[in-house]
Amino acid sequence: MNSVDLTQHFLIAMPAMADPHFAKTLTLVCEHNENGALGIIVNRPTDLDLQGLLEQVKIAPQQGQSFGAVPVHFGGPVQVDRGFVLHSPAGTWQSTLQVGADIGLTTSKDILEAVARGDGPPQMLVTLGYAGWAPGQLEHELAQNAWLTVPARADILFELPAEERLAAAMQLLGVDYANLSDEAGHA
């Protein structure tokens, strides 16, 4: 087993990515170990906003709080009926996966209740669904040139609009997405 750990790295889908779930996506790897990998697509906003999501899960925002301008993203094709909140700081929620020193991925309802009260984390990205890979699957896809990888940065996740995140991650590599080839080769 290859000992690569891509936790807290971005996966940048190569132009030849055929899977429509992942074409032109930027994915944050939240966990990567011998059991596989879990990631969240961070550049695919949906038509649903946080206000609508809170209504669906029967959480009433505190008076004066409105979340209609906060998009809910498509996080990946697995468990699309389940919410995931990527946030900073990591905090102490009921069910949080520590992604990095300052980033957590929470699946428990208590974080949404805190957000509705105005007590949520200052930086967050809400998704429905996640991306998952079986043991060795992500490594195989990397060997097939399906993805580029680069260490993730919180400013790209939380400070940029969704449509700018992929290009910003590419700039970390010094590459323009438009210049990538659909064809890949091995030397």
Image (cartoon, helix red, strand yellow):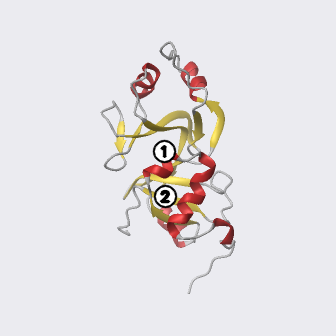
Which mark, residue 1? none
Lateral position of residue 177 relative to residue 173, left or right: right
Q: Position of residue 2 (x, y in %)?
A: 38, 69
Quarter of the image with the N terminus is bottom left
State which quadrant residue 44 falls in: top right
> Closer to us: mark 1 or mark 2?
1
Residue at position x 55%, y 43% from top?
75
Lateral position of residue 59 relative to residue 101, left or right: right
Q: Residues within 10 Å of mark 2 (few under 14, many from 20)?
A: many
Q: Residues within 10 Å of mark 1 (few under 14, many from 20)?
A: some
Sequence-wise, which precedes: disc 1 or disc 2? 2
Quarter of the image with the C terminus is bottom right
For residue 45, above or below residue 180: above
Say which of 168 and 134 sits in front. 168
Distance between mark 1 and mark 2 Cα atoms: 14 Å
Q: Is residue 38 visible?
A: no
Q: Position of residue 176 (x, y in %)?
A: 62, 68
Residue at position x 69%, y 53% from top?
20
**Outermost residue, bottom side:** 187
Which mark, residue 158? 1
Q: Is residue 186 visible?
A: yes
For residue 89, above or below residue 51: below
Callout 1 secondary element: helix
Which mark, residue 10? 2
Q: Position of residue 165 (x, y in %)?
A: 57, 53
